[in-house]
Every structure is written in structure tokens, then in C-alpha cells.
Amino acid sequence: MKQIIPGLWDIDEIGDAVHCYLWEWAGGVTLIDTGMPSHARTILDVLVRNNYPLHTIRRVIVTHSDLDHAGGLAKIRRATGASVICHAVEKELLEHPNRRLLGSALLRASMTLLSPLPAFRQTPVSPQELIVDGDVLPEGFVVIHTPGHTPGHIALLHREKRLLIAGDALANRGGKLQGPASIFTPDGKNAQRSIWKLAKKYGDDYETIVFGHGPPIMSNGGKRVKALASQVFSTEI
């Protein structure tokens, strides 16, 4: 595991195609996202190896229901007994992954064909706690509803730590800050509005940003998201 800031660890043993995180706080340990189905065993082994007994993982926050963020969720929940937390709107997709819409009909058909394979098989999970925009979680995070990539996508803001966990509302690919991949984003307009929200409503509240895809931005994160929002919406005029 690699420490990003005090309290936040990237479980980098699963590789860098997608990121999931461990958050240490006064009440215990929380996982944020769970990677692909094949990542669950690695994550569980890493936790034990780093002196986090599985029973201490009491909560798993899901930024959104995609296979690469919630694919390992069912197995991790069974192993830890943790409560699963997601946005109220995302509950349907956690319980019915086959209802996920994509930005491309061809990609949707391809995913349907792949879904029976173990590497792409997503086990439905029912969340124990539903959250909405503006909720303050015990971990200290403010929930920011950032729809577009999925209807119930969330980002997490920790004002004291000046940290934003962006999920897939933002990505840092090839050193370039950008929105979510359009091919996986059925509602591009709402995805752009979510970038605007992260910039204009919350852009003064964070410096560090971590992503589902791409390396972290350690400083000036809010300023960079403001610049991205200005760029995105300048093309709309």
C-alpha cells in the first residue's frame, strides 16, 4: 500500500489501471471502492498483511457501481461483514449491474457478452446505508453527488485534510486532468455539470485529488479543476 496523505492509502498492489483506497480515521478503517472481481482476494490479503484484521473493516463506500470499482465488493463484504454505503440513486445499479447504461451501444453489447466470464462477472450487492448530496459521513467526508458517469456517482470531500476523492467524475490520464471517458458515460451533459460543481462550489476546499484512474494531484487541485471547468464550458458558448 502507498500512503497518499496521512490517513489515506492507495491499495496499489492491484496495479494502476484502477485505484481503491483505505481510509484510517478515529472510528476505524473504511475502504473506498473495491476494484475488479479479481482484485478482491488481493485486497483482502493486503489488508491482513498490513495488520488490518478483516473484522476491522466495518464500512465500504462505493463511489459508483461500475465493474472496476465495485467488482470486488460482494467478496469483500462477505469476508469482512462490512456495511456497504452508496448514493441512494446508485442502489439500483449495485443490485442490478446489468442495467448500467454506457455511452456506446456497441460497448454495452460487448460487456453483455463478457459478463458471464469470471473476470467480468459482477455479483449484485444490496447496500446497507444510502447517502445523498451534502451528507456528512462519520469518516469526515462530505458527499458530493456527481452524476453523469453513472446516475448516483459520488465524490468525497474532506475539508480538514483538503482532500477530494473524485472517483470517476474526474480522471488524470497521461498527466492531463479531464472528465470521465465518454464511451463509459451515458450522460455527458451531467458529467460536465458535475465538473462545474466540483470547481465552482467546492474548488476552494481541496488541494489533493485522488482518482479512480490516474495518479494523484498533490497540490493546487482545486485551481486545476476550476481551470478544467472553464475550458469545458468555454466550448459550450
Image (cartoon, rainbow, N blue to C red):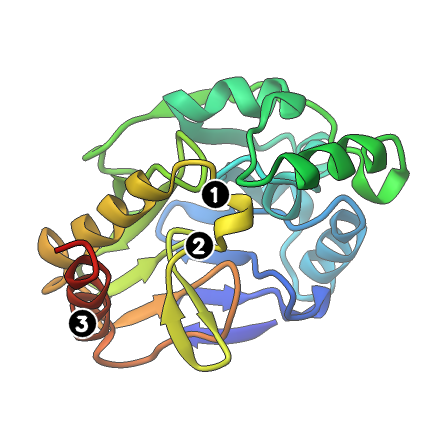
Residue 6 visible, this orientation: no
Q: Given contact means CB atoms under 8 Å apart, are the residues at marks 1 and 2 in contact?
A: yes
In the displayed structure image, the side of residue 45 where residue 233 appears, left or right:
left
Identify residue type, mark 1: Thr
Q: Position of residue 67 (x, y in %)?
A: 66, 41
Query: In the depicted view, which residue is nearer to us: 48 or 236?
Result: 236
Residue found 81% across the figure and 49% down from its top: 38
Picture layout, residue 118 above or below residue 218: above
Q: Could you tell me which secondary element the residue under label 2 belongs to?
A: loop
Q: Which mark is residue 180?
A: 2
Residue found 74% across the figure and 37% down from its top: 111
Picture layout, residue 99 above or below residue 25: above
Q: Position of residue 168 (x, y in %)?
A: 45, 52
**Mark nearer the N terminus (3 vs 1):** 1
What is the quadrant of the N terminus in the image?
bottom right
Identify residue type, mark 2: Pro
Q: Could you tell me which secondary element the residue under label 1 belongs to?
A: loop
In the displayed structure image, the side of residue 78 where residue 70 appears, left or right:
left
Residue found 38% across the figure and 58% down from its top: 179
**Mark nearer the N terminus (2 vs 3):** 2
Q: Which mark is residue 227?
A: 3
Could you tell me how far apart the alpha carbons at marks 3 and 1 are, in whole angstroms? 21 Å
Residue 50 visible, this orientation: yes
Q: Residues within 10 Å of mark 3 (few under 14, many from 20)?
A: some
In which quadrant of the rendered view does residue 223 lie? bottom left
Q: Position of residue 11 (x, y in %)?
A: 61, 64
**Mark nearer the N terminus (1 vs 2):** 2
Picture layout, residue 181 above or below residue 1: above
What is the quadrant of the C terminus in the image?
bottom left
- Residue tagged 1: 185
Identify residue type, mark 3: Ala
